[in-house]
Image (cartoon, rainbow, N blue to C red):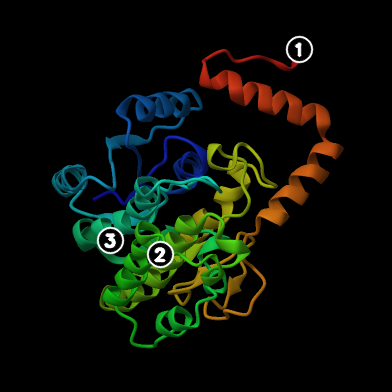
């Protein structure tokens, strides 16, 4: 029976690049999944033109019926999975987010993985590998509230603890009692930080739960990557950002388990809440400014093309 790898949220960005790399390196069947079937099949067509042949299945991690449909398909066609990369993600804007927007971030980035854990993880075969794509916003140092630092650091941490952490944040936003000082950077992109911290904490619980099947579960910060999520700003291309995730599911030693891995492959202590590894808007602004000054023409072209792509009017370098 063929080995099987599946990447959630992979019609574009890092997920797409991971699928492309797996098609080139993994000896087995690779699944590209997406919420939109139209966009997913368009991504499949792009990969086909490169001579790559991934399979496709629709998947919305926030829709239980969609996850069940995927489970039933994988079970009937392949009998199980060997590699699962939870890549589907969503980030809110820095300012002026509605409660519904905040909840959407949590639903996709954290609760969606809980649904995958319930329905898809039982199909991951012995010696399989699971990777949760997180962020520098997922390191515990993003939290400044001492109660939650201590509680999320417990050796006997349970999913109920993480759920209460997430609910605490959402309740504070709903009631208007949220204190920006409970997080770093004056509470910027708060829902995203909370969702990714929750995901990293969940990773360690998942590792403990799956030890009996010799499954490795890790989380990774893929870097500041040029994707739609970052408005095409970043110091890594999607292909560059895919290297460490692919390494973790194909080549990393079995002893690497329950780890928080940086984009360069370095394993960081997730529990070090005093570490200076979290994302700040100041860093983003300074990086963008210096980068644009050095690469002004390239960025003008990139931004114009990004805008025109939204209205399906691509241009070429000859336009500038």
Q: Secondary structure at mark 1?
A: helix
Establish if 116 lies above or below 210: above
**Left or right for 145, reference 59:** right
Q: Secondary structure at mark 3?
A: helix
Give the label, 1 or 2, closer to the camera: 2
Farthest right residue in view:
294
- Residue 199 marker: 2
Residue drawn at point x = 39 percent, y = 32 percent? 53
Q: Position of residue 118 (x, y in %)?
A: 20, 61
Residue drawn at point x = 51 percent, y = 62 percent? 220
Of callouts 3 and 2, which one flags the residue occurring earlier in the amino acid sequence? Answer: 3
Does any portion of residue 267 appear in the rendered image?
A: yes
Q: Position of residue 80 (x, y in %)?
A: 22, 54
Q: Position of residue 277 (x, y in %)?
A: 64, 68
Per the image, the residue denoted by label 3 is: 114
Of callouts 1 and 2, which one flags the residue occurring earlier in the amino acid sequence? Answer: 2
- Residue 309 marker: none
- Residue 318 marker: 1
């Amino acid at each position: 029976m063929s080995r099987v790898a599946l990447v959630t949220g992979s019609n574009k960005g890092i997920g797409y690049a991971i699928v492309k790399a797996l098609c080139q390196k993994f000896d087995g069947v690779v699944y590209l999944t997406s919420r939109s079937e139209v966009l997913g099949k368009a991504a499949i067509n792009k990969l086909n033109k490169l001579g790559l042949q991934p399979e496709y299945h629709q998947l919305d991690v926030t829709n239980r019926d969609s996850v069940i449909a995927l489970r039933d398909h994988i079970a009937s066609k392949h009998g199980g999975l060997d590699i699962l990369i939870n890549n589907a993600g969503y980030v809110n804007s820095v300012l002026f987010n509605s409660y519904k927007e905040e909840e959407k971030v949590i639903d996709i980035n954290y609760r969606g993985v809980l649904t995958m854990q319930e329905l898809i993880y039982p199909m991951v075969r012995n010696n399989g590998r699971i990777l949760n794509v997180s962020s520098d916003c997922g390191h515990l140092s993003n939290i400044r509230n001492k109660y939650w630092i201590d509680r999320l650091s417990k050796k006997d941490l349970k999913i109920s603890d993480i759920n209460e952490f997430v609910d605490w944040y959402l309740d504070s936003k709903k009631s208007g009692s949220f204190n920006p000082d409970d997080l770093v950077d004056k509470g910027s992109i708060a829902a995203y930080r909370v969702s990714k911290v929750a995901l990293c904490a969940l990773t360690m619980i998942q590792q403990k739960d799956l030890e009996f099947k010799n499954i490795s579960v890790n989380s990774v910060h893929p870097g500041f990557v040029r994707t739609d999520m970052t408005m095409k700003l970043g110091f890594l291309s999607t292909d560059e950002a895919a290297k460490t995730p692919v390494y973790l599911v194909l080549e990393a030693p079995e002893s690497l388990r329950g780890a928080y891995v940086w984009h360069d492959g370095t394993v960081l202590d997730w529990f070090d809440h005093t570490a200076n590894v979290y994302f700040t808007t100041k860093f983003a602004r300074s990086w963008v400014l210096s980068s644009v000054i050095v690469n002004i023409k390239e960025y003008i072209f990139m931004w114009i093309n990004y805008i025109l792509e939204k209205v399906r009017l691509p241009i070429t370098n000859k336009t500038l």
